[in-house]
Image (cartoon, helix red, strand yellow):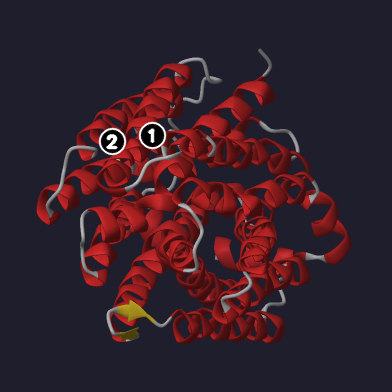
Amino acid sequence: MGVKTRLSVMMFLEYVIWGSWLPLMSLYLSETLHFSGVQIGWIFGTQAIAAIVGMFIGGQLADRYFATERFLAGSHLIGGLAMFALAYQTSFWPFFLGMLVYMLVYIPTLSLTNSISFHHLKDAQEEFGRVRMFGTIGWIAASWPFVFILADKTGAELLNARSAIFTVAGVASLALAAFSLLLPKTPPSSSGQRNAPFEGIKLLANPAVAVLFLVTLIDAVVHQCYFFWTSPFLSHIGLLDKWNMPAMSIGQIAEISTMAALGYFLKRLGWRTTMIIGILGHVLRFFVYSIGSPVWMVVGSNVVHGFCYAFFFASVYIFVDDYFPKDARASAQSLFNLLIVGVGPFLGNMLWGWLGDSYKVAGVVDFHRLFLVPSGLGLAAAALLFVGFHPVKGRIESEVRA
């Protein structure tokens, strides 16, 4: 099996895991376990805690002490066991602690699967999108079993069946734990930065990097609203549970072609324009969500998700790999990964949970008002990127080295 094939299978399983539980998590926590918006926010917030810990500990362990493929194997083994345990938790604190354990071992693998790919690909700007595309395919594949798992179930039976999101994720985690041992050998670096997290903060001295840092933070906050409220929202407007995840996966279907063509768009449109298109995808989708009908238009608006993720977040990862000197890339990837899967989602979870509780009318969330907020934040982020992001490769390299 060739290197790119193994990396593609790795990405497929990595995102089967995440795609199995994330889209329906909010619906499960709110309607099955009856947690409040703030409690749901804290459970989702374990992702940020894990991202911070992963930046200071997990990434350093993989960089300096363990081969990346073995670190991935151990992490997914523990993560799979944690997922099986979560299926049986029904009160807040046990669920919160179980999710925290899971996130602590899973979140570092998101950046490590990127780094192992960059390490073994000859032309990351051209090839990474096509490898990462299989992660999107994995996310879509994870949604379809639930069409059958949740079919023809109502009442208590439906509520109980939703816990299958953790079982599917657990099985995929164990599969990736075993497959990780077949990945290309990626030994720990003996010449890495002494402390990549602190080195990463120094990169903000460059104006273009500082602007991209702030825009990435805002976009990550906006992006999290999709995962926090979409499944309850679709249920609210009448979509059956069994079609909830496939409806959300429409965005991932579009993401496949977007990822495959990302290298082409980056070369034709440039970094700034490509990233702005990605941000404006959020603006359009949440504006349609705020309208709330007809259902087909709401579901169809998810097609822009492919542009939201590929054109912005994937572009950020590739930009860092392309614009920063080799000895600073680990620091920069850690810094931006902290925003994308850590601080941004944490702030988003707190904001969207609080707004959901605040915008309730007769016990029902006013989704029209709620979804105008992320749409407005997205517009502000796009404007900031347009005005302030003018990267110069040589200047970034010289300032980073200085």
The CA distance from mark 1 to mark 2 is 7 Å
Foreground of the two, 59 or 25: 25
Q: Residue at x 12, y 52 (%)?
A: 91
Find residue 71 and report its image quarter: top left
Looking at the figure, which quarter contains the N terminus? top right
Residue 183 is situated, as x and y percent measured from the top left of the image, at 53, 20
Looking at the figure, which quarter contains the C terminus? bottom right
Residue named by callout 1: 169
Query: In the image, 36: left or right of 62?
Result: left
Q: Give the secondary structure at mark 1.
A: helix
Residue named by callout 2: 83
Q: Amino acid at mark 2?
A: Met
Question: Where 372 sits versus 176, above or below?
Answer: below
Foreground of the two, 155 or 401: 155
CB under 8 Å between discs 1 and 2: yes
Residue 322 is marked as none
Q: Residue at x 63, y 60 (%)?
A: 305
**Crowding at mark 2 (Cα within 10 Å: few <14, some 14-19, many 20+):** many
Residue 297 is situated, as x and y percent measured from the top left of the image, at 67, 68
Q: Give the secondary structure at mark 2.
A: helix
Foreground of the two, 372 or 55: 372
Q: Residue at x 32, y 39 (%)?
A: 161
**Crowding at mark 1 (Cα within 10 Å: few <14, some 14-19, many 20+):** many
Residue 159 is situated, as x and y percent measured from the top left of the image, at 28, 47
Residue 186 is situated, as x and y percent measured from the top left of the image, at 50, 25
Query: In the image, 49: left or right of 380?
Result: left
Find residue 308 and report its image quarter: bottom right
Residue with the most extreme top position = 1
Nearer-N-terminus badge (1/2): 2
Q: Residue at x 49, y 63 (%)?
A: 238
